[in-house]
Amino acid sequence: MDRSLVSLQGAMSATVLLLAGGLGSSGHALAATDKPPLTVVRGPRVVTAGDIACEPGDEVTATTCQDAATARLAASFRPRYVVTLGDEQYQDGELSAFRSAYARTWGRFLSITKPIPGDHEYHVSGAAGYFVYFGQQTRTPGYYAWDVNRWRVYALNSNCSKIDCTAETAWLDRDMTAHPRTCTALTMHHPRYSSSQHGDNPDVEPFWAVALRHHADLALAGHSHQYERFRAMDASGNATIRGMVSFIVGTGGKSLFTRTGPRKGSVVYDDHRAGVLTLNLGRRAYGWIYKTIDGKTVDSGRRTCH
């Protein structure tokens, strides 16, 4: 049963919410400053977040334009790869802004970054600034797959008003058929489910449906500017052990959203500070830690692949 266990209200209506499934080993609800138990998973380390850099010259506040702080936090984990979840550069994804803002913070990871475009990148025609900055001209229209350990990771372009997502879905099905893996993850800008103002995104349901037919394990997204973890769900919003666990990590620094209502299946929600999610991708399992720039470990756990 989904029920709220903890709701911690702080300054500026910031919220840390731990729902059913967010209990410590003793069975009590965790406060925001507690560190949840984490079973170590050995494997390559990936750091991820989206919605990252403000426009050049924008003012840094406690809850906005914190991309320099999230970059320092990301670097502290010494990742093998950095996965960015779209809207890397506000407001319009211009190449000049990438080079003068994003490059000064998260640009330090450029050689190990696996990016995807967000909707703000498409404020420039064809997301040209994004493709030039990340050197992905040959990857247009912006989706691809890459391998790490026993994982295959699908970097999907969820801007379905800008590209042909029907063709992308067919490509995803073909590639998953041709490259079966023990563990599989999807990354995309738009989350299938969200408890904040942007809400759910039905456009990505076909990606989920195909991925679940191939027993995918994990979905990562941004767009909604909060951290949120959902229990294993299917493409239609039903909790199921064979579903994908999904994370929203729209906390790369730009700004934060507040929770508008509890979405069924949500386990943890946090909007108190920017932060990054760290994943260890093991041979048959993955572990995660979500940490914020003020040093709090908000969420952690371990799960075996399908």
Image (cartoon, grey):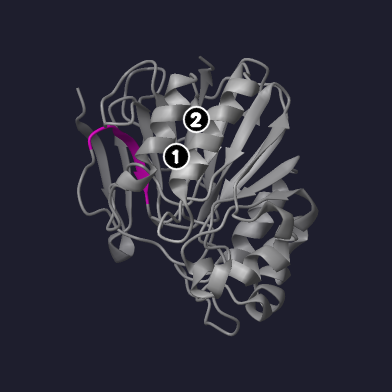
Q: Is residue 276 above or below residue 242?
A: below
Q: Amino acid at mark 2?
A: Leu
Q: Position of residue 25 (x, y in %)?
A: 41, 18
Q: Residue at x 49, y 74 (%)?
A: 123
Q: Position of residue 140 (x, y in %)?
A: 64, 56
Q: Which residue was labeled with disc 1?
A: 247
From this viewpoint, is residue 83 visible? yes
Query: Extreme right residue here?
Result: 111
From this viewpoint, is residue 286 visible? no
Q: Is residue 14 above or below residue 150?
A: below
What range of the chain is rendered magenta? 264-270
Q: Amino acid at mark 1?
A: Phe
Q: Position of residue 200 (x, y in %)?
A: 29, 47
Q: Earlier in the sequence, mark 2 or mark 1?
A: 2
Secondary structure under the numbered disc 2 in the rendered image: strand
Marks 2/1 in contact by CB < 8 Å: the verdict is yes
Secondary structure under the numbered disc 1 in the rendered image: strand
Cα–Cα gap, marks 2 and 1: 8 Å
- Quarter assignment of residue 99: bottom right
Q: Residue at x 35, y 25 (%)?
A: 23
- From the viewer's perspective, tell me whether residue 101 is left or right of residue 108: left
Q: What is the magenta segment's predominant secondary structure?
A: strand
Q: Is residue 269 magenta?
A: yes
Q: Which residue was labeled with disc 2?
A: 218
